[in-house]
Amino acid sequence: MAYLLDTNIVSELRKGRRCDVGVRAWFDTLDEDDAYLSVLVIGEIERGIERIRKRDPKSATRLRRWLSALVTRFDDRILPVTLSIARTWGTLSAPTPIPTVDGLLAATAHVHGLVLATRNVTDIHSLDIEWVNPFERA
């Protein structure tokens, strides 16, 4: 089984020893080649870095290095938003509107046959997709 990791999962894994025990245990069972990211996750992390840059430039620099390493590590496992994904998002989110990025992540997982790993289950529980919340596995 392969997974699309939401930003909240990637950010939690970055914490190292402070990472939620359930998230770490879940991720450690995966073959890394079965973990995917979306360009949207990269964008959300980028936005977070830019938001802290003025008040904490050193942290922003550390996060920028981490993001660069993450992009290199996932390389060909970073998925774009395609026309098919956009149309699937429209179909999935029509009955119950959800935040755009969460909906596009759900559509990306659906189109690629992936399970969406996220903490945002409130936003996606009603969608016809497979998902897992590693925070609840502890």
Image: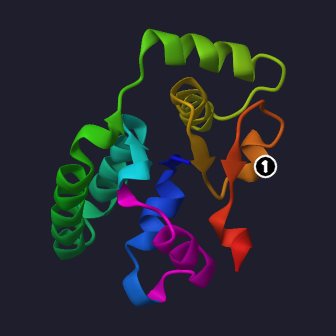
Residue 19 drawn in magenta: yes
Q: At which x and y percent is residue 113?
A: 57, 32
**85 with respect to 53 (left or right):** right
> Element type at marker 1?
helix
Residue on which disc 1 sits: 122
Which residue appears at 65% of the width and 59% of the height?
119
For the residue pair 135 and 60, the one nearer the viewer reads as 135
Type of the residue with mark 1: Thr
Which quarter of the figure has residue 109? top right
Tell me residue 29's x, y (percent). Answer: 51, 70
Q: Quadrant of residue 111?
A: top right
Q: Residue 127: give x, y in percent of width and height.
A: 78, 32
Q: Residue at x 51, y 50 (%)?
A: 6
Tell me where the magenta segment starts and ends, as one range: 18-32
Task: Tell me the crowding category of disc 1: few under 14, some 14 to 19, or many 20 or more residues within 10 angstroms, Cα based.
Answer: few
Up the image or down, 15 lies above or below 104; here it is below
Is 101 left or right of 33, judged from the image as shown?
right
Magenta-span inclusion, residue 99:
no
